[in-house]
């Protein structure tokens, strides 16, 4: 899957992350996510560096420091309108899978350049075929960039 980016679904202003098949039918998998996760993914995609590491930056740094390789992210399931994902990792020759929210796994993958996959059953159930209308996509990107201009990392401090 290719991480297209984060969009804001109108009229509810709900953030959605879009994943597109790199091969085959090029279906798009839209996953509703929270605004904090949307910002984390967008920051990673746009190369935004914050004064202090955000949660996903910290996770990336910890994994690297511990010598853990993140091999791939897999959107594994859609159950009761909720997506599930796994982070597949290796260290010292052993493989591990950790359950994750897709938004967190994608935010991590965006920071590490990790490939993202989706099970065919998830794609069959939830993916859509979208038109290749570049003008419409450019408008959506511009609306999201305007949203990002008003957002600061401090807005998400706890």
Image: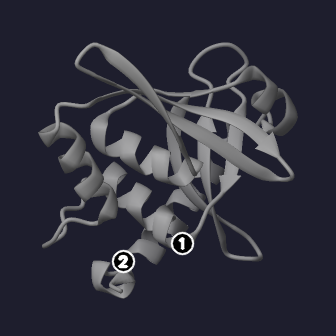
Instruction: Say which residue label 1 marks.
Output: 35
Depth order, front residue of 140/50: 50
- Secondary structure beneath label 1: helix
Residue 15 in sight in this render? yes
Residue 69: give x, y in percent of width and height: 28, 27
Depth order, front residue of 73/88: 88
- Secondary structure beneath label 2: helix
Q: Which residue is depicted at the point 81% across and 39% down?
A: 126
Tell me the mark number nearer the camera, choosing from 1 and 2.
1
Label number found at residue 5? none
Question: In the rendered view, would you say 5 is above or below 13?
Answer: above
Residue 61: give x, y in percent of width and height: 18, 48
Location of the N terminus (image quadrant): top right
Colour option used: one colour
Q: Which residue is depicted at the point 47% across and 45% down?
A: 105
Depth order, front residue of 93/12: 93
Whichever of callouts 1 and 2 sits on the residue coming sooner in the sequence is: 1
Check if mark 1's residue and mark 2's residue have beta carbons within 8 Å: no
Residue 85: give x, y in percent of width and height: 60, 40
Residue 131 in sight in this render? no
In the image, taking residue 83 as reference, residue 93 lies left or right, namely left
Question: In the rendered view, would you say 5 is above or below 40?
Answer: above
Residue 89: give x, y in percent of width and height: 38, 28
CA separation in Å, label 1 and label 2: 14 Å
Label number found at residue 149? 2
């Amino acid at each position: 899957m290719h991480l297209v980016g984060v969009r804001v679904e109108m009229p509810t202003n709900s953030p959605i992350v879009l994943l597109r098949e790199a091969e085959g039918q090029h279906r798009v998998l839209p996953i509703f996510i929270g605004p904090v996760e949307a910002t984390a993914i967008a920051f990673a995609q746009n190369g935004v560096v914050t004064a202090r590491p955000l949660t996903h930056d910290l996770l990336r740094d910890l994994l690297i420091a511990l010598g853990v390789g993140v091999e791939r992210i897999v959107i594994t399931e859609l159950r009761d309108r909720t997506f599930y994902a796994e982070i597949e990792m290796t260290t010292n020759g052993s493989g591990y899978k950790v359950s994750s929210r897709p938004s967190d796994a994608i935010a991590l993958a965006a920071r590490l350049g990790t490939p993202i996959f989706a099970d065919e059953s998830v794609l069959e159930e939830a993916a859509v075929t979208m038109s290749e209308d570049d003008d419409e996509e450019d408008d959506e990107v511009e609306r999201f960039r305007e949203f990002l201009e008003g957002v600061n990392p401090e807005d998400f401090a706890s």
